[in-house]
Image (cartoon, rainbow, N blue to C red):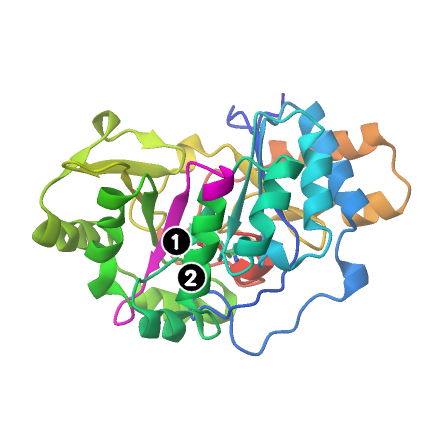
Amino acid sequence: MALDSLGRDIRYLRISLTDRCNMRCVYCMPEEMRFALRDELLTADEILAVARAARDLGFDKIRLTGGEPTVRPELVDIVRGISSLGFRAISMTTNGLRLDELARPLKEAGLERVNVSVDTLDADKFHRITRWGKLETVLAGIRAAEKVGLTPIKINAVVVRDYNDDDVADLAALTLEHPWQVRFIEMMPFGQVAQFAQEGVVSQQEVIARIEAKLGLLEPVGDGRLDGEARLFRLRGAQAAVGFISTVTNPFCATCSRVRLTADGKLRLCLLRDDEGDLRSLLRNGASFEALRERMRELIFRKPWGHGLPDNVIPLQRVMSQIGG
Ligand code: SAM
């Protein structure tokens, strides 16, 4: 078991496979990025070594992310390797552009489900937000994931003032037609995109008001308690819930059970703080399995209480794609 100094049981590891992405979402990374060099990234074997140590520490849930995890060439092999370690849940967050071709091999390798990022159902706006993305390709990816059983599917939407704040009701309406949970994520400030994110953030309260004005009441699910990081609501007659991940206005630090492995081998203790510990040099200096596991235990113990956004403490070292959202 890996406890932090506040007694939180840390058992959820989000693994970033790469800092690269085949989109350039306006709130995530600037169009011109410097990416890590190949030998700065953990190899597939190094990633599996960290996953094995996490399993030994009692972690039971893995999410693969990035950057865009589907641009990592060894993705399917990494999923197969992680799947053999016996985690309770293995999922992936993706922009969906490559899901059409990868859904089946990923399912066969042991992936259980996917979250797909879709910020709007308007193809032109989708292109404006993602800069390089094509909505139709992503929707085909979601259909492919559904067909092979990478379910239940969750759709993640970051709401950005003057980009897609008008589109939240259309996205929520997906839950009336499909068994897809649609989750609205409040935009968070990071590094070079911090100012953009702070100026464009749209609160949970406003998103709820916009949805209810078009689609009727959103009833709280489970008395409004958190389900993971989301608070869930449901439209009358819907097949799935509408969720809100409101890290800025309604944080869930008290129940946080996660840490992140960045693609360049740092264990990041809180998404929104720059505290990290290096695992790559340990791995490359021939550390034993026990040494790696104990280093991870030590770092986890130092997990900070929560983020500092209310005090204007903004993570400046990395943007979301370099952390693993
Ligand atoms: N490329 C994959 C994707 O698009 O889902 C996985 C990585 S992406 C960094 C993970 C999630 O973080 C996406 O849902 C994305 O929209 C979200 N994200 C990126 N930058 C963000 C920000 N500044 N605030 C809130 N969410 C953000």
Quick one: SS at disc 2?
A: loop
Tell me where the magenta segment starts and ends, as one range.
Answer: 147-163
Q: Can residue 313 be seen in this view?
A: no
Amino acid identity at mark 1: Leu
Q: Mark 1 and ligand 1: say if the CB distance to the nearest ligand atom is below 8 Å.
A: no
Check disc 2 and give the amino acid type: Pro
* Left or right: 187, with 109 as reference point: left
Mark pair 1, 2: CA separation: 9 Å
Query: Is 153 part of what is drawn in magenta?
Result: yes
Near-viewer residue (290 or 324): 324
Specify few, some or many for label 1: CA neighbours under 10 Å numbering under 14, 14-19, or 20 or more.
some
Res 3 quadrant in image: top right
Q: Is mark 2 within 8 Å of ligand 1?
A: yes
**Mark 1 vs 2, N-terminal side:** 2
Q: Residue 98 in the image: x percent, y percent? A: 56, 58
Label 2 sits on residue: 189
**Is 299 displayed left or right of 93 in the figure?**
right
